[in-house]
Image: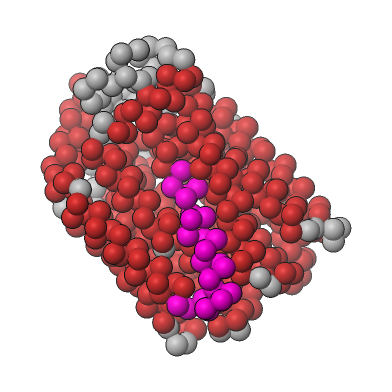
Amino acid sequence: MQGPGPGSNGGPSGNGNRPVLPAPTGWRKTFSSLQGNRDFRNLFIGNIGFFFGMNMMIILRGWLVQDKWDNAAYLGFIMAAVAVPMLLISPFAGVVTDRVDRRKLLIVAQSWLVVINGFVAVLIITDVIQFWHLLIVSSITGAAFAFNMPGRQALVATLVPRERLMNATALSTAMMNVSRIIGPLIGAALIVPIGIGGAYVVATAFYASAVAVTFLLPPMPPQREKEFTFFQDLVGGFSYIRNNSMLLSLMLFATVPMIFAMPYMILLPVFADRVWDVGENGFAMMQAASGIGGLIGAMFIANMDSYPKKTRLLVGGAFAFGGFLILFALSPAFWMGLVMLGLVGLGSMVFMTVNNTSIQLVIPDEMRGRVMSVMMMTFGLMPLGAVPAGVAAESIGVRPVVAIAGTLCIAAMLVLFFSLSAFRRMDEEMATGQARQAERAAQGIPGRSRMPAGVSAGGPSSY
């Protein structure tokens, strides 16, 4: 079944027969994927509401835990409550994403976030909120994210021509970082006048706006060459990843920061409260500093579609991420910590944008939901670092925990990079993939990537 054709405003809505748009120049190059593509613009606008709501929830939930229970380990438990359902449900969510209309799936998943976060707001306002309430709701949130995030990432590659995919990915991450800058500041600013409960209501309204805009997207039925059972699709997704060495290497490389480095985010309230005593406003400034750095990194990458040495960008961003994280942990003053957080955000966004774009370039559309859902499983691995980090922070202090995390991250990525041969041909494969997709788009051929030998869209050919 083929997806819908191009939108009436020039925006491609399917993976094949995309228009070949003239290459923009100057400042327009930074926003090339949004030009003449109404459907991607609508998705982009919906993402604004979604990520503003999400980043407001992060600061509100983190500050609620720190203020009400003052226990760093609790922050790790909340992270685990979100991440474990994502780890367990993501493979099944990916199969569902590839079998149903992605627009309808997003509407349902986002609506569920509106309902459960509205429920939390009521519990906070009525002053009956308990920690176990947050654990349960966080678990439900993680399950909703397992369906929501792969669908959003898959739609970017569905709506945007391959030659502008890195630009679209970079703009999406840039918008995420704008929300990381402004969202926490809005959340912190609302706590004093209307309380955490009232701020939760505002954040829930942002989620609701994302639902409304998603209704403007065209139907997104699955693009499948032949039908398979649910189980065949599930097995086929893992078989495809296992048989594609480049894809497997990129996904392993993306997993390392999730285990070792990303848990620093759940410890930021502890830095704000115990290390520098800057309160909720300082916590919001820390979130914003990381977001500003990420925004700069994403806007830089948005102009690097044609840069041939993407391996350098990937590795440079990864090592900057871990290195500046160590310097943040050792920063003697709050202002220096903000600078280091900005550089952490820059490095992490360069790394994640190049890694995500490279993955999108080597997978076919009919596999996209399943592959991106496995990527979401890496977030489910965060408790492997988050829970021990939270517990250790109570025992030995938050500074040494984060410094050790950054060191382990760099060491693990060095081992992977030099032990996996796929990275040594990454630039060549990325260039070949982009050229092949551009040629097929010019000829009006649907942009399906070549499967590894013995693997079909649903599973091994033995089926």
Magenta range is 377-400
Q: How many marks?
A: 0
Give the color scheme: rainbow, by chain, secondary structure or one colour.
secondary structure
- Residue 376 location in percent, x, y? 46, 43
Q: Residue at x 37, y 24 (%)?
A: 236
Quarter where residue 5 is shown: top left
Q: Position of residue 227 (x, y in %)?
A: 42, 12
Residue nearest the observer in this picture, 228 or 338: 228
In-front residue for pair 406/201: 406
Quadrant of the rendered image containing residue 415 = bottom left
At 25% across and 24% down in the image, what residue appears? Answer: 451
Along the viewing direction, whichever of 394 and 452 lies nearer the viewer: 394
Q: Quadrant of the C terminus?
A: top left
Residue visible at 58% across and 64% down in the picture:
184
**Residue 448 shown in magenta:** no
Q: Is residue 267 shown above or below 233?
A: below
Whether residue 86 is visible to the viewer of this picture, yes or no, is: yes
> In terms of secondary structure, what is the magenta stretch mainly?
helix
Nearer to the camera, 335 or 266: 266
Camera sees residue 186: no
Q: Residue at x 53, y 71 (%)?
A: 392
x, y (%) of residue 333?
47, 87
Q: Is residue 401 left or right of residue 246?
A: right
Q: Specify whether 396 is left or right of 9.
A: right
Compared to residue 108, the image places residue 431 above or below, namely: below
